[in-house]
Amino acid sequence: MVLEELYDHQNTIKKVIETLAPAIESGCELFISTLTSGNKILLAGNGGSAADAQHIAAELSGRYVKERKALPGIALTVDTSALTAIGNDYGYDFVFARQVDALAQPGDLFVGISTSGNSESIIKAFNMAKQKGCKTLGLSGRDGGKMQGLCDLNIIVPSSKTARIQEMHILIGHIFCQAVDDLF
């Protein structure tokens, strides 16, 4: 079982390298252009993808590898009062869209993370981000789901296994953070 999992991971990363390097480079450019223009990056996801959103946001506001100035990365998954109030008053599907409506400015970047590409709370947040004049970046898997038509860039991990998709999402997030470190 251990070797099977390791080889499956290796095969997935090989596919990512072969097919997604240009898209990941474009994602790096979105991160850099957003931050150099004085805008912020808002991130959201559910479950393990929420943890990834928080992880990437922390690498921006804290640091990734090198010492640099703090940068505006905000995970929309961490304010339990907002999440529970919005979920209670409007329904869970609106927990991120309402926060995007409150916090986003034109030129900001909204990053939505969903292994299926179909999480309704993320879909609604993408729609709101577009209304607010934000750039949009998706991290998804499988066939990209409903996110495919909503993002300026949707990086679709070539796998149908949630674990492999999530492993690649955090790797891609780290690559974005390295590009930011290289610039700042």
Image: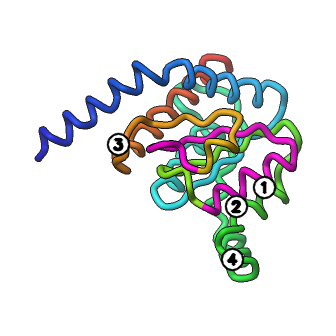
Residue under pointer 2: 96
Which of disc 4 and disc 3 is earlier in sequence? 4
Q: Is residue 61 left or right of residue 34?
A: left
Residue at 13 percent of width and 44 percent of height = 2
Answer yes or no: do the residues labelled 3 and 4 have beta carbons within 8 Å? no
Other-residue count near label 4 (Cα within 10 Å), few / some / many at <14 / 14–19 / ≥20: few
> Is residue 149 or residue 110 the one in the foreground?
149
Q: Position of residue 102 (x, y in %)?
A: 84, 59
Q: CA distance from mark 1 to mark 3?
A: 28 Å
Q: Position of residue 65 (x, y in %)?
A: 51, 27
Residue under pointer 3: 164
Answer yes or no: do the residues labelled 1 and 2 have beta carbons within 8 Å? yes
Residue 54 lies, with reference to residue 23, above or below; the image says below
Residue 132 lies, with reference to residue 29, above or below; the image says below
Q: CA distance from mark 1 to mark 2?
A: 6 Å
Q: Amino acid at mark 2?
A: Phe
Disc number placed over residue 100 in the picture, else none? 1
Residue at 35 percent of width and 42 percent of height = 164
Q: Position of residue 165 (x, y in %)?
A: 41, 43
| SS at badge 4 | loop
Q: Which residues are magenta?
A: 120-145
> Is residue 28 or residue 116 the one in the foreground?
116
Callout count: 4
Q: CA distance from mark 3 to mark 4?
A: 30 Å
Residue at 62 percent of width and 60 percent of height = 77
Residue under pointer 4: 91
> Is residue 96 or residue 121 the one in the foreground?
121
| SS at badge 3 | helix
